[in-house]
Image: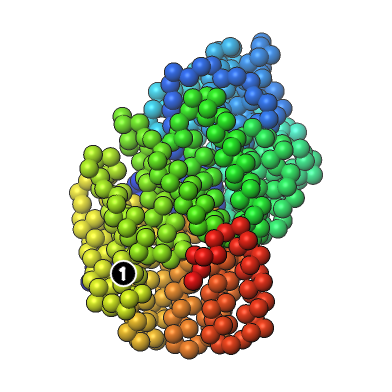
C-alpha cells in the first residue's frame, strides 16, 4: 500500500490535472489572500445599489459629467480595498448606468471580475472589454494607463503588463494612493519556509510603509498591511488592527481583519469578539440586501476563522454552535457547482472538523459518517475528501483503544481511496492537487502513530517528522488548512518513548505558531504532571486557566 501512496505523491508533483479545482497555487501570499475572493457569486434581481457610509473613501477622480457617477465609482474602488468584490461590481455597474461614456467604471468592472472564477460574469467581462477598448482611445492621463494595463491583462492573462502600467501611474502621478495599493497587493509574495521574504515582498512592504505615513486614515492601507505582516511579524500590524475597523465599519471583511492579528498574537478573546462583530455586520448587510449566507464569502470565512479561534481557547460548545450554522447554510439547487466549495468544504463538514480539532475522534467519525450524498449534491471529490478524513479519524480512534489491526485497515483503505480517485477519468470527480496534498498528511500521520503504537519508536518518529514537514509545506493559511497540528502526534510519540525534552519542544513549536494555545498548554500540563515537575505545571496551569476562562474546561481530560 505504501507503493500506492508513493505513486500518488508523484502525481501531486507532476500531474497538472490535480490543480484544476477550487484551490490555486498557495506558494505566494497573494494567492492565499485572493483565494477566498475567487468564488464570488453572481446574484440577479437585486435593486440598484445605494451609496454606503462606512466602507472607506477612495479619492481617485475620473472624467465624468456626473457627480453621482463619481460617487459610485469611488465607492466601488473603496469596496475593492475591502475585498467586497460583488458590491464593487454593483457600484461600478451603477456608475456606468449613470454615465456610460466614462472610461474608468469599465476598468473597475474588469479589475473586479478578472479575479472571480465564475462563468456567470463572462458576458459582462466581454462587454466591458469591448466598451473599454473604444472609450480608451480618447482616454488621457492615468485613465489611459489604467485602461491600457487592464486590457493587457485581459489579453495576455498575465498581470505583468498591468503592473508595469500601475508603476507608470505611481511614477507620473505620485499622489495616486489606489495605484500604490494595487501594486502592493499584487506584489505580496509572502515568505519561504525559513521566513525569508520572497521576491516582491519587500517591494510591497515599502509601498505600504510609505502609505501608512502619508495616508494613515485609508482603510486599504491598514487592510493590506495586516495581510502583509500577519504571517511574519503580526506585532508590527497591531496598531493597524486596533485602528482598521473604525475606518470602514460597514464592511464585514474590514471589521473581521483585526481578528487575524489578535489571533496570531494569541489574544483569542479579542479575536473572538472581533469575529463576532464582523458576523453581525455581515448579518445586517445580508438581511438588508436579501443576500444568502452562501453568497457572502466573508461571512463563511469569518465563521471558519472563529472556529479555529475557538479551538485555541477551548470554546468547544460555542465552536460547534457556529459550525452547525455553517452546516445549515442553504445552497441554490441550480448553482450547486458554484456553491460546492463553500457549501461543503466550509459548511457541511465543519462540525466534524471541529471535533477533529479537539481530538474527539469518536464524535468526528460519527459526524463524518452522517454526511451522505443521496441527492448527488456534493459530488464524488467532496465525498472522497470526507471519506479520507473519516478513515483517518477512525484509525486514530482505534489507536486510542490500542486496536492496531483496525488502525492498519483504515490506513490501507485511506491509501486505496487515493489510488482509486487518481484513476478517475472525470476531472471534476478527482481531488484537486491541494486537497490531495492536505489529505496525504493524514496517511503519513496515521502511519506514524501506528508505528509508535507498535513501539517502533525510531521509524515512527521519522514518519511523524515527515508528517510535520508535509503539514508545514502546505503553506501559510489562517485558519489552518490542516485541522489539528501534527506536532501533537509527534509530542505524544516522544512522550511514549520517554524523550520528554523533545516532547516539550514540540509543544513549544505549537506555541511559537499559536501563542497561548490551550491545546499546547494542556499537553504541557499533562507532561509536567506525569514528570512531577510541579513548578512548571503550576506556571503553565496559570496560563491555561487564563486562556480558557471563556471556554469549556471539561473538554480537557
Q: Is residue 263 above or below residue 530?
A: above
Q: Position of residue 2 (x, y in %)?
A: 26, 73
Q: Residue furthest right?
A: 213
Whether residue 545 appears in this view of the structure is yes
Residue under the point 63% across and 16% down: 69
Residue 198 visible in this rendered orientation of the protein: no
Seen from the viewer's position, the closer of residues 336 and 64 is 336
The quarter in which the N terminus is drawn is: bottom left
The local secondary structure at tag 1 comes to helix
* Number of numbered tags placed on the structure image: 1
Q: Residue at x 31, y 72 (%)?
A: 398
User: Who is closer to the viewer here, 218 or 165?
Assistant: 218
The residue sitting at 60% across, 62% down in the picture is 548
Does residue 6 appear to the left or right of 471 in the view shown? Answer: left
Asked if residue 5 lies left or right of residue 349, the reply is: left
Residue ID for mark 1 = 395
Q: Residue lying furthest front in this view?
A: 554
Q: Position of residue 42 (x, y in %)?
A: 43, 28
- The residue under the point 46% across, 61% down is 357
Residue 165 lies in quadrant: top right
Expressed as whole percent of the image width and height from the top left, the position of residue 236 reads 72, 56
In the picture, measured across the screen, residue 232 lies left or right of residue 116, that is: right
Disc 1 residue crowd, few under 14, some 14–19, many 20+, Cα 10 Å? many
Quadrant position of residue 48: top right
Amino acid at each position: 500500500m505504501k507503493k500506492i501512496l508513493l505513486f500518488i505523491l508523484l502525481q501531486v508533483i507532476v500531474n497538472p490535472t490535480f490543480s484544476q479545482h477550487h484551490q490555486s497555487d498557495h506558494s505566494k501570499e497573494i494567492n492565499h489572500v485572493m483565494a477566498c475572493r475567487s468564488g464570488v457569486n453572481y446574484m440577479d434581481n437585486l435593486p440598484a445599489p445605494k451609496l454606503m457610509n462606512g466602507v472607506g473613501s477612495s479619492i481617485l477622480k475620473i472624467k465624468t459629467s456626473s457627480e453621482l457617477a463619481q460617487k459610485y465609482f469611488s465607492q466601488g474602488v473603496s469596496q475593492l480595498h475591502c475585498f467586497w468584490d460583488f458590491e464593487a461590481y454593483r457600484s461600478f455597474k451603477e456608475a456606468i448606468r449613470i454615465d456610460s461614456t466614462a472610461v474608468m467604471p469599465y476598468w473597475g468592472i474588469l479589475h473586479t471580475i478578472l479575479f472571480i472564477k465564475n462563468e456567470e460574469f463572462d458576458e459582462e467581462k466581454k462587454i466591458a472589454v469591448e466598451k473599454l477598448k473604444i472609450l480608451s482611445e480618447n482616454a488621457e492621463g492615468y485613465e489611459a494607463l489604467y485602461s491600457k494595463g487592464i486590457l493587457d491583462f485581459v489579453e495576455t492573462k498575465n498581470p505583468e503588463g498591468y503592473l508595469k502600467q500601475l508603476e507608470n501611474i505611481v511614477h507620473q502621478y505620485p499622489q495616486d494612493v489606489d495605484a500604490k495599493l494595487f501594486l502592493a497587493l499584487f506584489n505580496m509574495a509572502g515568505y519561504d519556509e525559513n521566513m525569508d521574504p520572497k521576491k516582491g515582498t519587500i517591494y510591497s512592504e515599502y509601498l505600504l510603509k510609505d502609505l501608512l505615513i502619508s495616508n494613515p486614515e485609508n482603510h486599504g492601507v491598514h487592510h493590506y498591511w495586516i495581510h502583509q505582516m500577519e504571517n511574519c511579524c503580526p506585532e508590527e500590524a497591531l496598531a493597524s488592527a486596533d485602528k482598521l475597523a473604525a475606518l470602514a465599519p460597514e464592511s464585514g471583511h474590514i471589521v473581521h481583519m483585526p481578528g487575524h492579528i489578535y489571533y496570531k498574537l494569541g489574544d483569542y478573546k479579542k479575536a473572538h469578539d472581533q469575529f463576532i462583530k464582523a458576523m453581525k455586520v455581515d448579518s445586517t448587510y445580508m438581511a438588508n440586501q436579501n443576500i444568502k449566507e452562501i453568497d457572502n464569502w466573508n461571512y463563511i470565512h469569518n465563521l471558519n476563522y472563529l472556529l479555529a479561534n475557538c479551538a485555541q481557547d477551548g470554546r468547544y460548545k460555542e465552536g460547534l454552535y457556529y459550525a452547525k450554522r455553517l452546516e445549515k447554510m442553504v445552497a441554490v439547487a441550480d448553482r450547486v457547482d458554484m456553491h460546492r466549495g463553500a457549501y461543503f468544504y466550509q459548511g457541511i463538514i465543519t462540525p466534524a472538523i471541529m471535533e477533529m480539532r479537539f481530538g474527539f475522534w469518536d464524535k468526528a467519525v460519527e459526524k463524518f459518517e452522517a454526511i451522505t450524498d443521496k441527492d448527488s449534491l456534493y459530488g464524488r471529490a467532496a465525498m472522497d475528501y470526507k471519506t479520507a478524513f473519516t478513515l483517518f479519524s477512525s484509525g486514530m480512534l482505534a489507536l486510542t483503544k490500542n486496536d492496531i489491526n483496525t488502525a492498519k485497515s483504515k490506513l490501507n483503505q485511506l491509501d486505496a481511496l487515493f489510488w482509486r480517485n487518481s484513476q478517475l477519468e472525470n476531472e471534476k470527480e478527482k481531488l484537486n492537487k491541494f486537497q490531495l496534498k492536505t489529505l496525504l498528511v493524514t496517511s503519513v500521520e496515521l502511519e506514524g502513530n501506528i508505528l509508535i503504537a507498535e513501539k517502533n519508536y525510531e521509524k515512527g518518529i521519522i514518519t511523524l517528522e515527515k508528517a510535520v514537514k508535509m503539514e508545514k509545506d502546505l503553506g501559510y493559511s489562517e485558519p489552518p488548512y490542516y485541522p489539528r497540528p501534527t506536532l501533537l502526534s509527534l509530542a505524544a510519540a516522544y512522550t511514549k518513548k520517554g524523550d520528554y525534552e523533545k516532547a516539550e519542544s514540540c509543544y513549544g513549536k505549537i506555541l511559537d505558531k499559536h501563542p497561548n494555545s490551550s491545546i499546547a498548554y494542556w499537553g504541557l500540563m499533562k507532561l509536567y504532571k506525569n514528570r512531577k515537575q510541579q513548578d512548571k505545571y503550576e506556571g503553565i496551569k496559570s496560563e491555561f486557566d487564563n486562556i480558557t476562562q471563556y471556554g469549556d474546561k471539561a473538554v480537557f481530560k
